[in-house]
């Protein structure tokens, strides 16, 4: 499981820092293609993956009546995604019909889920944006689900945005998009990403003082010494304030 300490670390880290760490670890195919936040103001997304896989719809099976059945796989996914988890929907990149709308996403939010991601579309996007709930999609899609998608399976390996997703993988999303971290590597990735964030804060401080980027990035032996001093002084100021 994702520990609270690691979750807190990831909430400090932009997707850009995480993708840098994953690339260094040889995991370069972890960033979803053409998947973006539904609202620029929504909270950062961090949580483990609970998955829903779809296949193309077929007219004799996929109807409005089928969606309303008690054994609907789509409804099961929204009702059983565990609190704190992210519902990740494999829509095969197809945005001809929605994977859900504001009612289903409101249900996820009220159940305590961390967010939702699809490489397809959602309907009611203006209402979803008002939920202040992390939601990521390829594009808005107004037509109902059964016109393009047949949900077939939950909590199994899927693809989303060109990335392999295994149940329990850790999903992080922000204004840059969505990245996937294997659960077995998440503590390592989070710790390394926090170091990047802290060094980037130092770089921004120095750039505002007029220092050349050439002296700062990538890190040099001198900038590492300067960063260590800056970090120590900042920690001392925090300790004094307490």
Image (tube, rainbow, N blue to C red):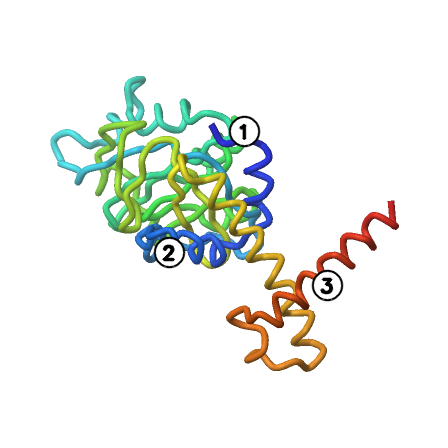
Residue for point 52% across, 26% down: 111
Rendering quarter of residue 118:
top left
CB within 8 Å, label 1 to label 2: no
Horizontal arrangement in the rendering, residue 231 relative to residue 77 (left or right): right
Crowding around mark 2 (Cα neighbors within 10 Å: few <14, some 14 to 19, many 20+) is few
Horizontal arrangement in the rendering, residue 181 relative to residue 131 (left or right): left
In percent of width and height, residue 137 lies at 38, 50
Kindly state the secondary structure of the residue where label 3 is placed: helix
Kindly state the secondary structure of the residue where label 1 is placed: loop
Horizontal arrangement in the rendering, residue 209 relative to residue 169 (left or right): right
In percent of width and height, residue 162 lies at 27, 50
Crowding around mark 3 (Cα neighbors within 10 Å: few <14, some 14 to 19, many 20+) is some
Residue for point 60% across, 61% down: 199
Identify the residue position indicated by label 1 in the image: 112
In percent of width and height, residue 185 lies at 42, 40
Q: From mark 1 to mark 3, how far is it between C-alphas?
A: 39 Å
Above or below: residue 27 compared with residue 211 = above
Identify the residue position indicated by label 2 in the image: 23
Query: Which tag, 1 or 2, sits closer to the chain's start?
Result: 2
Above or below: residue 69 compared with residue 167 = above
Outermost residue to the top: 70
Rendering quarter of residue 77:
top left
Q: From mark 2 to mark 3, how far is it between C-alphas?
A: 27 Å
Which of 212/98 is in front?
212
Q: Quadrant of the C terminus?
A: top right
Q: Which mark is residue 230?
A: 3
Above or below: residue 154 compared with residue 180 = above
Q: From mark 1 to mark 2, how far is it between C-alphas?
A: 32 Å
Kindly state the secondary structure of the residue where label 2 is placed: helix
Which of 67/213 is in front?
213
Residue for point 58% across, 70% down: 221
């Amino acid at each position: 499981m994702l520990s609270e300490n690691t979750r807190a670390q990831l909430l400090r880290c932009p997707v850009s820092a995480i993708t840098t760490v994953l690339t260094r670890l040889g995991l370069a195919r972890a960033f979803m293609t053409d998947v973006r936040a539904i609202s620029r103001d929504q909270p950062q997304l961090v949580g483990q993956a609970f998955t829903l896989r779809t296949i193309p719809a077929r007219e004799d099976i996929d109807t409005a009546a089928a969606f309303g059945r008690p054994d609907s796989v789509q409804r099961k996914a929204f009702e059983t995604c565990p609190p704190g988890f992210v519902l990740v929907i494999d829509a095969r990149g197809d945005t001809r019909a929605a994977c859900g709308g504001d009612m289903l996403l409101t249900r996820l939010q009220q159940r305590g889920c961390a967010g939702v991601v699809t490489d397809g579309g959602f309907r009611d996007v203006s209402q979803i944006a008002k939920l202040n709930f992390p939601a990521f999609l390829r594009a808005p899609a107004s037509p109902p689900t059964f016109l393009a998608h047949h949900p077939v399976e939950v909590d199994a390996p899927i693809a989303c945005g060109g990335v392999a997703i295994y149940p329990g993988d850790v999903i992080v999303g922000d204004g840059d998009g969505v990245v996937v971290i294997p659960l077995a590597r998440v503590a390592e990735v989070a710790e390394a990403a926090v170091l990047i964030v802290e060094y980037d804060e130092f770089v921004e401080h120095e750039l505002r003082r007029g220092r050349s980027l050439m002296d700062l990035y990538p890190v040099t032996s001198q900038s590492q010494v300067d960063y260590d001093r800056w970090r120590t002084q900042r920690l001392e100021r925090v300790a004094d304030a307490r």
